[in-house]
Amino acid sequence: MTSKQQGVLRPSICRFRLGEFEVTSILDGVAQRDNLHPLFGENETAEAVQALAQANRLPPDKFEHPFVPALVDTGSELILFDTGNGQARRGAGVGNLRPLLGEAGYSPEDVDIVVITHGHPDHIGGLLEDGEAAFPSARHVFGEREFKAWVENQNIPDARNENREMFMNVAAPFGNQATFVNPDDEVLPGIRAVNAYGHSPGLLAYMIESEGKNLLLWSDVTNHYGVSLQKPEWHAFHDDDKDMAVATRKRILDMATTDGLWVHGYHMPFPSVGFVEKSHDGYRWIPASYQLNL
Ligand SMILES: [Zn+2]
């Protein structure tokens, strides 16, 4: 018999209810990378990071980094949170948000609002398709502080020079007609911005509430489900302001735990929905199972 092996197959679309809202996670793709350290635990020894990986039954020398935009259908509006890596990186196994939209039951024209949590490439990469607005009917929403930081090149580390060029090409052109929000502002009733500054100058998380159910979409407050939660004080290479990112991580993890919030995390394992519990001197990620379907 010839082999029927076809390689890895991953779930890439998942929809659940949140009160009257529907939330769909779409896997834009997965990057496989070498060595958690020094990307995670930059201010720790490689041995300490490897030991933590092993304690979580994770290999010490390789890891996966998923990218998971979310769609929220309020019943009257369809809101996309972040646009994935986009066309430029589609050949590299990421940038699949757009091809998967149809399978999830939507067309790009269905999206009423695009919310960009921050200006890093894996979040803004899908704003354009063939040089045109990828979601042509949508109003675009940016954090005011974040947008200003990129356009004025304030508090952007030199390591992000290429990222800045990309921001100016794909995101800045939306500035004329965009809506700008600040912490505590509402995008729509039930969708409110939350200060999450640190990973980038003006990163915004979003609290999504419907019929007493609360989901905190925390974007890149954490970037690894084990390391960032169990050791929130460890520095991460991708955090632009390390100290502010640590303080924000601790504040948001504490809030998610204390208030028993559902969480959607852009780099948490697909479908990137779960909740958080205190554990040892840090926190633990608990993936959702069926709770939100009942
Ligand atoms: Zn990211």
Image: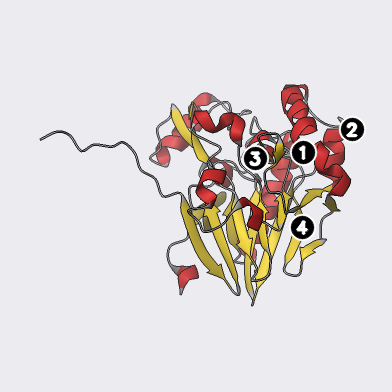
Of the pair 246 and 73, the residue shown nearer to us: 73
- Label 4 Cα crowd, 10 Å radius (few <14 / some 14-19 / many 20+): many
Q: Nearer the viewer, mark 1 or mark 2?
A: 1
The kind of residue on which mark 1 rests is Ala
Q: Which mark is residue 126?
A: 3
Label 1 close to label 3 by CB (< 8 Å): no
Label 2 vs 4, first from the N-terminus: 2
The residue carrying mark 4 is: 193
The residue carrying mark 1 is: 171
Q: CA distance from mark 1 to mark 3?
A: 10 Å
Q: Residue at x 86, y 30 (%)?
A: 153
Label 1 vs 4, first from the N-terminus: 1
Q: Provide the secondary structure element on which disc 2 rests.
A: loop
The kind of residue on which mark 4 rests is Ala
The kind of residue on which mark 3 rests is Gly
Q: Provide the secondary structure element on which disc 1 rests.
A: loop
Label 1 vs 3, first from the N-terminus: 3
Q: Residue at x 43, y 67 (%)?
A: 290
Q: Nearer the viewer, mark 1 or mark 4?
A: 1
The residue carrying mark 2 is: 152
Of the pair 2 and 71, the residue shown nearer to us: 2
- Label 2 Cα crowd, 10 Å radius (few <14 / some 14-19 / many 20+): few
Image position, residue 130 (x, y; %): 66, 34
